[in-house]
């Protein structure tokens, strides 16, 4: 069966530019999560969606980061005015319920020059 | 602050050696516990999980973990590692959100 997919797999951009990262969760999973993983670190929670709504966005580092999930399936993470410090792997995961097993996508490797 | 700690940053073992990776958490209340593995060039995969019941849980590829509530620990074990176990291992805890430890890199020498 299809797992979580993420596009693009790699994104190189220049400082100050806007980027969008897409996540397509497992069909039927109502919970969707975004994480950021820097080199040598574990995934860092950014935001959690239950259906279409952002149930917990406490992990977003600042107001340059925003995510949407308008139809309760695909989600887009949006980063405005990118900074070099935003360079990381952005991971998406989905699950059937908040406390259940999360299934991860392959990630998008973002490099801000 | 709530946190997940993995004590070993990098572990190097020879094939057939026994493995134990430590994980401690500081959350109170009911938690669900997970170990994920990330093989080189691959995405995070679930190794095993604990929700309730028998505190000794068995996962894929011969791994097991023991939940010790009094110690807030969920250590991962494998009696005999293989070269193919070379990977990064992450402990994760769900209270309201999932929080990950920093990971332990395991290198198994053939």
Image (tube, rainbow, N blue to C red):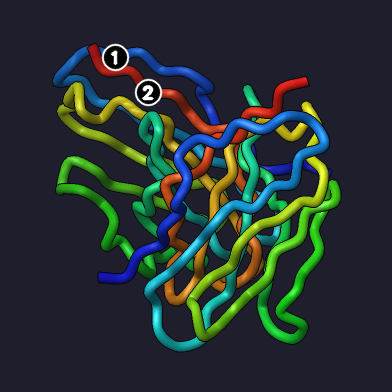
Q: CA distance from mark 2 to mark 1?
A: 8 Å
Do tags 2 and 1 sit on the same chain?
yes
Task: Give the residue drawn at x 53%, y 71%.
Answer: B73
The circle on residue A110 is 2
Where does label 1 land, which residue?
A13
Position of residue A33 relative to residue A96, above or below, is above
Task: Find residue B2 and report its horizontal and vertical position in percent.
Answer: 32, 70
State the residue at coordinates (59%, 44%).
Answer: B89
- Vertical order, A10 against A99 (above or below): above
Q: Position of residue A37 (x, y in %)?
A: 40, 38
**Badge number at residue A52:** none
Label 1: element kind: strand
Q: Quadrant of residue A17?
A: top left
Q: Quadrant of the C terminus of chain B?
A: top right
Name which quarter of the figure residue B64 lies in.
bottom right
Relative to A112, say whether A79 is above or below. below
Quadrant in which the N terminus of chain B appears: bottom left
Closest to the camera, between mark 2 and mark 1, is 2
Q: Chain of mark 1?
A: A
Residue for point 84% across, 47% down? B61
> Are there few (<14), some (14-19), or many (20+) residues within 10 Å of tag 2?
many
Q: Nearer the viewer, residue B107 or B37?
A: B107
Rendered view: B27 above or below A60: below
Q: Secondary structure at mark 2?
A: strand
The chain carrying label 2 is: A
- Contact (CB < 8 A) between labels 2 and 1? yes
Residue B100 spot, x, y in % from top left: 45, 55
Circle 1 crowding by C-alpha within 10 Å: few under 14, some 14–19, many from 20: some
Coordinates of residue B25 in the picture (x, y in percent): 43, 69
Residue drawn 63% across the image and 75% down it: B67
């Amino acid at each position: 069966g299809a797992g979580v997919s993420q596009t693009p797999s790699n994104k190189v951009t220049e400082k100050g530019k806007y980027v969008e990262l897409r996540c397509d969760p497992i069909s039927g999973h109502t919970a969707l999560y975004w994480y950021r993983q820097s080199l040598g670190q574990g995934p860092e929670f950014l935001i959690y969606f239950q259906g279409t709504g952002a149930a917990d966005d406490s992990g977003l580092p600042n107001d340059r980061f925003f995510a949407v999930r308008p139809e309760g399936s695909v989600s887009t993470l949006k980063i405005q005015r990118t900074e070099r410090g935003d360079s990381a792997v952005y991971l998406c995961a989905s699950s059937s319920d908040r406390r259940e097993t999360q299934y991860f996508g392959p990630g998008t490797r973002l490099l801000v020059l | 602050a709530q946190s997940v700690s993995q004590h070993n940053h990098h572990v190097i073992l020879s094939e057939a050696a026994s493995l134990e990776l430590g994980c401690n958490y500081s959350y109170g209340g009911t938690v669900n516990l997970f170990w994920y593995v990330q093989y080189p060039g691959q995405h995070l995969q679930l190794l095993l999980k604990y929700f309730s019941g028998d505190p000794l849980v068995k996962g894929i590829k011969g791994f097991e973990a023991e939940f010790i509530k009094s110690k807030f620990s969920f250590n991962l074990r494998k009696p005999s590692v293989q070269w193919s176990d070379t990977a990064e291992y992450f402990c994760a805890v769900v209270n309201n959100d999932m929080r990950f430890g920093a990971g332990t890199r395991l290198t198994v020498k053939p």
